[in-house]
Amino acid sequence: MFMKGEREIKDTREAQLRKEEADLDIDHAQEKQQQLHDKRLNTSLNTLKSLGWDTLDDFLDALITIKNLTQSSQVSRYLARHGEDFLDKVQQRQPSLVNDWALSTTRVVNMVLFLKQITTWVSLEIDYERGFQGGLGLFQLFWDILILISGLV
């Protein structure tokens, strides 16, 4: 017979062993799931090759530029629903690629905004003594250009 303190220690040990076994079962299940996931990916990639796609690049390029309306719609829906998560995963795997792309895209957007502003300025009548009609002076024009250009660099 166990005394009360010994019984509590035994119960605690048994509970700890059950938890460790459960944790092992979870780890084993996750490992099995990962193996199944890896096998499916390998099978899918081999199937792509057997269907004539020499590389994953070729397949992905064809998928993203697909002309079939139904399939193109499926790709668009995927990107709308999961695009941000997808880009996050790409950024985790290739940070410099995504960062460089984001910077260049920002520069292009800034350049477009700059060109729109230039178009607005050029379309104004210039009075060299009073500046631009509508109250925009030459100093303001150059100041705005400097601010816009500094955002492009």
Image (cartoon, grey):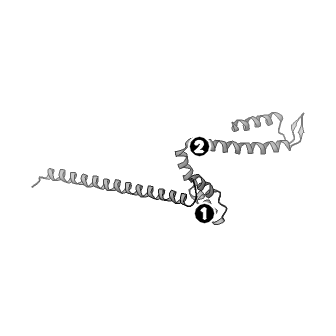
Q: Residue drawn at (86%, 43%), measured in percent from left and top?
A: 124
Query: On the image, numbered disc 1 is attached to which residue?
Result: 74
Amino acid type at circle 1 is Gln
Dot 1: element = helix
Q: Is residue 69 above or below residue 110?
A: below
Decide if residue 51 is on the left or right side of residue 121: left
Q: Residues within 10 Å of mark 2 (few under 14, many from 20)?
A: few
Label drawn at residue 63: none
**Nearer the observer, 153 or 27:** 27
**Nearer the observer, 1 or 105:** 105
Quadrant of residue 135 in the image? top right
Decide if residue 62 is on the left or right side of residue 39: right
Task: Residue 6 in the image: state x and y as whole percent.
Answer: 14, 50
Task: Residue 61 in the image: state x and y as whole percent.
Answer: 62, 54
**Nearer the observer, 42 or 126:** 42
Q: Is residue 43 above or below residue 90?
A: below
Query: On the image, numbered disc 2 is attached to which residue?
Result: 97
Q: Residues within 10 Å of mark 1 (few under 14, many from 20)?
A: few
Quadrant of residue 68 in the image? bottom right
Q: Residue drawn at (25%, 52%), measured in percent from left and top?
A: 16
Q: Residue drawn at (71%, 43%), measured in percent from left and top?
A: 110
Task: Residue 38 in the image: state x and y as whole percent.
Answer: 44, 55
Task: Residue 25 in the image: state x and y as whole percent.
Answer: 32, 56
Amino acid type at circle 2 is Leu
Q: Residue drawn at (16%, 53%), measured in percent from left and top?
A: 7
Q: Residue furthest bottom?
A: 70
What separation in Å lies between label 2 and label 1 (alpha carbons)?
A: 26 Å
Quarter placement of the C terminus? top right
